[in-house]
Image: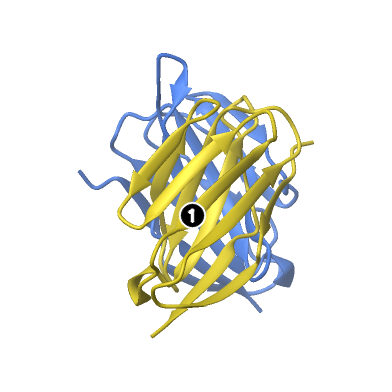
Chain colours: A yellow, B blue
């Protein structure tokens, strides 16, 4: 059974700092997705990673996938307050059945 | 495009009542899923469908039924509501091209309270 773990669960960081969120999963998959959720809102797609070594960047966020290590990272560069949200990774188990991590709640302090 | 539409947005049920959460998408997506979101638990998959007439169970299917008679609609039925089903429910749809799935588009959610 596929398990997806994220860490940290909570992250409080100063504006301007860098940090990385980790997503580990338990079985083979080369399809991983990152989402953002603002409080009380739905989920918004951030990145789609579909192969080993895939790297995607958008603004201050960069996501990568290492399928051999079963690890994806979401790197935040020079954080700003607007990035405060909860970030989820999700892994496709191979049958279009997505399993989500528990999320990382990010708070960027001014 | 409306995307993924969920109704209702809010609902209060009494224990033992049944109801159907509606989900419709207008993007001709093959794949649809229902998730529930509880504090500290992330999103847990209830049921999913890979096409009209085809459904399967997710991580937490007990107490819920689904059907997929058309590509557009994927309703979730609560058979006999229990307080443990108090949650926010999200419906999502997705498509694939060349064997690759490009991620789910989520509806706005239904906040359900069972008293």
Left or right relative to A29: residue A12: left
Q: Residue at x 44, y 58 (%)?
A: A36
Q: Position of residue A20 (x, y in %)?
A: 55, 58
Looking at the image, which is closer to me, B105 or A27?
A: A27
- In this view, the residue farthest toward the right is A1
Left or right relative to B61: residue A31: left
Q: Mark 1 highlights which residue?
A: A75
- In this view, the residue farthest toward the top is B98
- In this view, the residue farthest toward the left is B1
Residue B44 seen in the figure = no
Q: Residue at x 51, y 76 (%)?
A: A13
Residue B79 seen in the figure = yes
Q: Position of residue A55 (x, y in %)?
A: 44, 36
Rendered position, A15 above or below B93: below
Quadrant showing the C terminus of chain B: bottom right
Looking at the image, which is closer to me, B25 or B8?
A: B25
Quadrant showing the N terminus of chain B: top left
Q: Position of residue B66 (x, y in %)?
A: 59, 40
The chain under label 1 reads: A
Q: Residue at x 55, y 36 (%)?
A: A65
The image quadrant of residue A95 is top right
Q: Residue at x 35, y 72 (%)?
A: A80
The image quadrant of residue B83 is bottom right
Looking at the image, which is closer to me, B12 or A31?
A: A31
Label 1 sits on a secondary structure element that is strand
Count of labels in the image: 1
Rendered position, A10 above or below B20: below
Left or right relative to B3: residue A97: right
Rendered position, B54 above or below A78: above
Question: Would you call the spot at circle 1 few (<14 residues within 10 Å), some (14-19), or many (20 or more)?
Answer: some
């Amino acid at each position: 059974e596929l398990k997806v773990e994220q860490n940290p669960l909570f992250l409080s960081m100063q504006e301007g700092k860098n940090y990385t969120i980790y997503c580990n999963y338990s079985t083979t998959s080369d399809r991983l997705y990152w989402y953002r959720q603002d409080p009380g809102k739905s989920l918004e797609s951030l990145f789609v990673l579909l192969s080993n070594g895939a790297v995607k960047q958008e603004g201050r966020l960069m996501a990568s996938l290492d399928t051999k290590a079963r690890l994806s990272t979401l790197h935040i560069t020079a954080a700003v307050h607007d990035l405060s949200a909860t970030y989820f990774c999700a892994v496709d188990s191979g049958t279009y059945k997505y399993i989500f991590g528990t999320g990382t709640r990010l708070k960027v302090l001014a | 495009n409306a995307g993924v539409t969920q109704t209702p947005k809010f609902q209060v049920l009494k224990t033992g009542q049944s109801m159907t959460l509606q989900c419709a998408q207008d993007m001709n997506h093959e794949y649809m899923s229902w998730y529930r979101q509880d504090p500290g638990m992330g999103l847990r998959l209830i049921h999913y469908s890979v096409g009209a007439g085809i459904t399967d169970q997710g991580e937490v299917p007990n107490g819920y039924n689904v059907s997929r008679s058309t590509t557009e609609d994927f309703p979730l039925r609560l058979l006999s509501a229990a307080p443990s089903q108090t949650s926010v429910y999200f419906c999502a749809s997705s498509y694939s091209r060349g064997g690759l799935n490009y991620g789910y588009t989520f509806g706005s959610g239904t906040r359900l309270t069972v008293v």
